[in-house]
Image: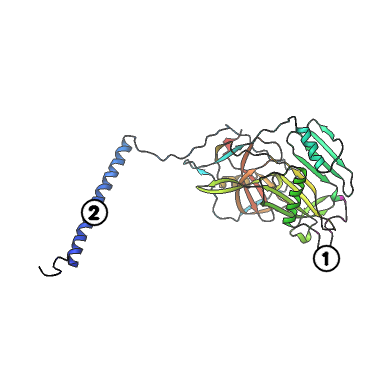
Amino acid sequence: MAAGSNRMSMTNFLEYARVGLLFGGIVLVMVTIFEVGMMAMRAATGELETVQYPQPDYAFGQLPGIRFPYQAGVVRPQTYQANFGAWPYYGEYMGGGYYMVPIYKLPKVGYDLTSDQKARQIAMNLGFAGEPQIIDQRTYLYNYPGPPLRETLQIDLKTMFLEFDTNYLSSSNIFGTIDRRGDRQIPLRTDAIKATRDFLSAAGIAPRDLSDQASSVQYMTSIGDSLQLVNTALEADYAVVNLAREPVEGKIGEETAYFNFYGPDGYGSIRAVVGRDSSGQDAVVELTDNYHELDLSTFGTYPLTSASAAWETLTAGGGYIINPRGVRTAVIDSIEFGYYESHDEQEFLLPIYVFRGQNDFMAYVPALLPGMYY
């Protein structure tokens, strides 16, 4: 046999390849026909498996509806304009056209043997001496006549919520003054948040789940006995701090997401007014602390209404409105999902859609299907 006579020619190779491909195709068609036939047989006998989507557990039965504060003087827009993209989808798909979200049960609050001692310690930490004025069975009031400012501190013995206030709005030439360079004395974002945190630490009540990144600062000027929102620190006398919690982890479809907390007037459980005096010292002149302890390990799952349905509720005149500039046409730029943090006692942490618009407009609409509330 001549050298190389045992090698396959290119023509023979291609011929074998064509035969192999033809045979493989026939096998693939036969397997496909077999699988389709088996599926049809299982469907006919009721044995066809269906996809099982997670279902809500309704762990707490029907839930109390969100009690937004009564809004007597708020300006409600006459019209709404949508300036956002596609409707957002939140939660985990149920398979029935809805998504579901976790509802968290909050720890119960109540008096205990240490309530009186805790309140007195907070007052002492903040420099209030003497006996409190007992407003009712659950409220202590402390007073400090000054100088430089008259101060009051009110503490709820049941919830440990507190309200600190001063007569800063009736005291001139203390805050918002002009320095030698012609700049207004006003704490910027980082300094205002730090002053608020320092106040809470001094009181001995600093929560550990607060987030500087999630917190916000607005600038306001004093007009008479009230504050008015301004656009920049150059116009402001005070910085108003919304000290927010760390966002809670959740899902958008199958994607992990983080949801913020929202309370009345656009701020969560801790709000402070911070001023800078002529010596450059920052001072908290007003603070409201309605901080709730959370237990994110106790929750149930409930179906979520759609963002488009919440939009219909809003444009029909529903929802809780935050409209500091009194706009008549609300231009909505974004829709967010979050949890409502009441400034009163609450049993559950309930979800809301948050509509954010131009000119600092905001609106809240309850996010569960209407039948979930009693």
Residue carrying label 1: 182
In the rendered image, residue 220, in percent from the top left (x then y), is placed at: 77, 55
For image coordinates 23% across by 50% down, the residue present is 27
Amino acid type, label 2: Gly
At numbered mark 1, what does the secondary structure look like: helix, strand or loop? Answer: loop
Q: Is residue 42 left or right of residue 231?
A: left
Cα gap from disc 2 to disc 1, whole angstroms: 86 Å
In the rendered image, residue 54, in percent from the top left (x then y), is placed at: 48, 39
At numbered mark 2, what does the secondary structure look like: helix, strand or loop? Answer: helix
For the magenta stretch, what is the residue range? 170-185
Residue 59 visible? The answer is yes
Amino acid type, label 1: Gly
Q: Is 284 or 46 nearer to us in this picture?
A: 284
Marks 1 and 2: in contact by CB < 8 Å?
no
In the rendered image, residue 224, in percent from the top left (x then y), is placed at: 85, 52
Q: Is residue 49 left or right of residue 250?
A: left
For image coordinates 63% across by 46% down, the residue present is 314
Q: Is 237 or 153 nearer to us in this picture?
A: 153
Earlier residue among tags 2 and 1: 2
Mark 2 is surrounded, within 10 Å at the Cα level, by few (under 14), some (14 to 19) or many (20 or more) other residues, namely: few
Residue carrying label 2: 24
